[in-house]
Image: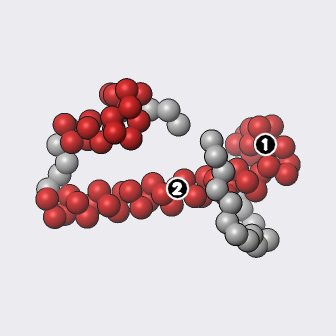
Amino acid sequence: MATQRAGSTENVSVSVSLPADLLSVLRERTGKRGLSSCITEAVRHQLEMDGLAEIVAAQEAEHGSLTAAEIEAASRELFGDAGRDGKHAA
């Protein structure tokens, strides 16, 4: 997965609580220095998903609920055959 990087970064010191088991897995996968990058990508992904949810909500407010066929077509367009039955690559 390609990582998008902003033109500049800012160090932020905040207290974030994570379940110990989740933090342990993150550190195993990313190493101590990769933790910020992993969290950055997770936040970016969540913001993108929130934006998509807003688009769908606006569409449904104007045109009614999406049909199963419309959802399947969108899934195929986004994920190809892997999008069938709601299953897609993460």
The amino acid type, in three-letter code, at marker 1 is: Thr
Please tell me which residue lies in front, 56 or 9: 9
| Relative vertical location of residue 5 with respect to residue 33 in this rendering, above or below | below
Q: Is residue 15 left or right of residue 77?
A: right
C-alpha separation, residue under disc 1 versus residue under disc 2: 19 Å
Q: Which residue in the rendered view is the most extreme toward the left?
A: 63
Q: SS at mark 1?
A: helix
Residue 20 picture location, percent across and down:
75, 45
| Relative vertical location of residue 5 with respect to residue 75 in this rendering, above or below | below
Q: Quadrant of the rendered structure where residue 21 is?
A: top right
Please tell me which residue lies in front, 21 or 11: 11
Q: Residue drawn 68% across and 60% down?
A: 5
Q: Is residue 62 left or right of residue 57?
A: left
Q: How is the image coloured?
A: secondary structure
| Residue placed under numbered mark 2 in the picture | 46
- Sequence-wise, the earlier of marks 1 and 2 is 1
Q: Residue drawn 36% across and 57% down?
A: 53
| Residue placed under numbered mark 1 in the picture | 30
Residue 74 picture location, percent across and down:
30, 42
